[in-house]
Amino acid sequence: MHLQVTPADKIIRTLAVYVALAIILRLVGKRDLAQLNTFDLVVMLVLSNVVQNAIIGPDNSLLGGLLGAVVLVGANAGVVRLIRHSDRVAGLLEGRSTILVRDGEWDEHALRAEGLRRADVDAALRRQNANSVREVQRASIEPGGVIVATLLPQEQPATAGDVARLEAKLDALLATRE
């Protein structure tokens, strides 16, 4: 229960590691946790262990651990609230979306810059009803790592509203023939 470092030292260490990791992960690129491959997962697990000593220092007390946890959660909550209120800060901290596909064509430069393989983006496109990249008007990777695709108009699935309009037109056409 006794802190082996001062509370100020614990807070500074925790905030420094939080900021450093946020910057490192921001520079690495946009990858959603759901898109982590095996190597990404290994890095995340080892990374937590690597920075542990930087946060706790010579203090492995219960109180020191709890103080570090409170500072981490509090700092994260503050950053989330700040991002929610300012698009400018959100763009700075999270980044902007990157277009990966335009009018059915890959943007190879964007794929390389984001560290993405065509196969991974293809899989994301298939989950959004595109059978091939040629069916995509625009696909982008958002700051949170999610890939969002807009299909070309002729490739978009019909909605219930589309079917209802066609039925109404057909009914009207049949009524004029009677």
Image (cartoon, rainbow, N blue to C red):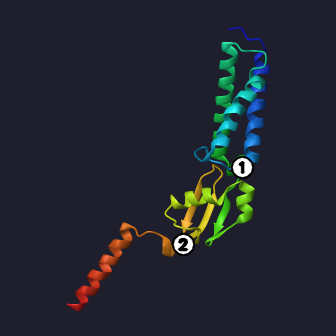
Q: Quadrant of residue 160?
A: bottom left
The disc label shown at residue 152, or none: 2
Measured as percent of width and height from the top left, residue 126 is found at 52, 61
Q: Is residue 110 above or below residue 144?
A: below
The residue that appears at 34% across and 77% down in the rendered structure is 166
Q: Secondary structure under badge 1?
A: loop
Q: Determine crowd level at label 1: few under 14, some 14-19, many 20+ residues with C-alpha closer than 10 A.
A: some
Q: Is residue 162 above or below residue 15?
A: below
Q: Nearer the viewer, residue 155 or 162?
A: 155
The disc label shown at residue 29, or none: 1
Residue projecting furthest to the left: 178
Q: Is residue 126 above or below residue 62?
A: below
Residue projecting furthest to the top: 2
Q: Secondary structure under badge 2?
A: loop
The disc label shown at residue 102, or none: none
Q: Nearer the viewer, residue 36 or 91?
A: 36
Q: Quadrant of residue 121?
A: bottom right
Measured as percent of width and height from the top left, residue 123 is found at 56, 57
Quarter that holds the C terminus: bottom left
Measured as percent of width and height from the top left, residue 144 is found at 63, 49
Tell me which label, 1 or 2, sits earlier in the chain.
Answer: 1
Q: Nearer the viewer, residue 144 or 31?
A: 31
The residue that appears at 61% across and 58% down in the rendered structure is 119
Q: Amino acid at mark 1?
A: Gly
Q: Determine crowd level at label 2: few under 14, some 14-19, many 20+ residues with C-alpha closer than 10 A.
A: some
Q: Is residue 53 above or below residue 29?
A: above
Q: Amino acid at mark 2?
A: Leu
Q: Disc 1, disc 2: CB below 8 Å?
A: no
Quarter that holds the N terminus: top right
The residue that appears at 63% across and 35% down in the rendered structure is 77
Q: How many marks?
A: 2
